[in-house]
Amino acid sequence: MQNAIVVLVVEDEPLVRMETVDMVEAAGYLVVEAANADEAIAILESRSDIRLVLTDIDMPGSIDGSKLAHAVRKRWPPIPIVVVSGKSVVDDSDLPENTMFYSKPYDRAVVTGTLGRLLGG
């Protein structure tokens, strides 16, 4: 895929990650996967083509998805962030500016529409 827009999907549950990857790819994006926030940071540090981060909140590792969102906003400010959670209820004030939040189960069409809007599509 030439000039493909790359989305980083961060999700610790393998089946949920697979479904999310399928959804993002079906929307026309190239996907890089991470099983936790530590992997996501390593990917972001090694690649300059990540255009959006879609992360779950509740994950094992040294930081959760909320802290990952703050780290991404601080170190890679132009990258849009979409945060999802099936367990946590998140107040917008707990997330960095310009971060979208969706509760699981979310409407796939709404989330892919948000991706398109955030990525200028």
Image: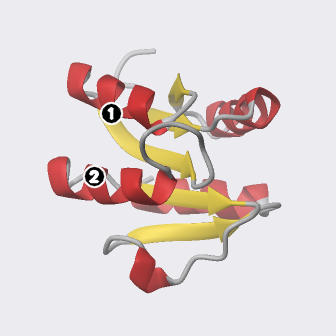
At label 1, the amino acid type is Ile
| Residue 60 in view, yes or no | yes
The residue sitting at 58% across, 34% down in the picture is 28
Q: Residues within 10 Å of mark 2 (few under 14, many from 20)?
A: some
| Residue 5 in view, yes or no | no
Up the image or down, 35 lies above or below 114; here it is above
The furthest residue to the front: 62
> Where is residue 7 shown, x and y percent of the image?
46, 36
Q: CA distance from mark 2 to mark 1?
A: 8 Å
* 104 to the left or right of 91: right
The numbered mark at residue 71 is 2
* 83 to the left or right of 1: right
The residue sitting at 78% across, 35% down in the picture is 19
The numbered mark at residue 106 is none
Residue 88 sits in quarter? bottom right
Up the image or down, 57 lies above or below 27; here it is below
The residue sitting at 69% across, 65% down in the picture is 110
At label 2, the amino acid type is Ala
Disc tally is 2
The numbered mark at residue 41 is 1
> Where is residue 78 shown, x and y percent of the image?
21, 54
* 68 to the left or right of 54: left
Find numbered disc 2 in the image and state the secondary structure of the residue it sits on.
helix
Q: Residues within 10 Å of mark 1 (few under 14, many from 20)?
A: some
Residue 46 sits in quarter? top left
Tell me if label 2 and label 1 are in contact, CB under 8 Å. yes
The residue sitting at 62% across, 38% down in the picture is 11
> Where is residue 117 shown, x and y percent of the image?
47, 62
| First in residue order: circle 2 vs circle 1 | 1
Up the image or down, 110 lies above or below 121; here it is below
Up the image or down, 37 lies above or below 113; here it is above
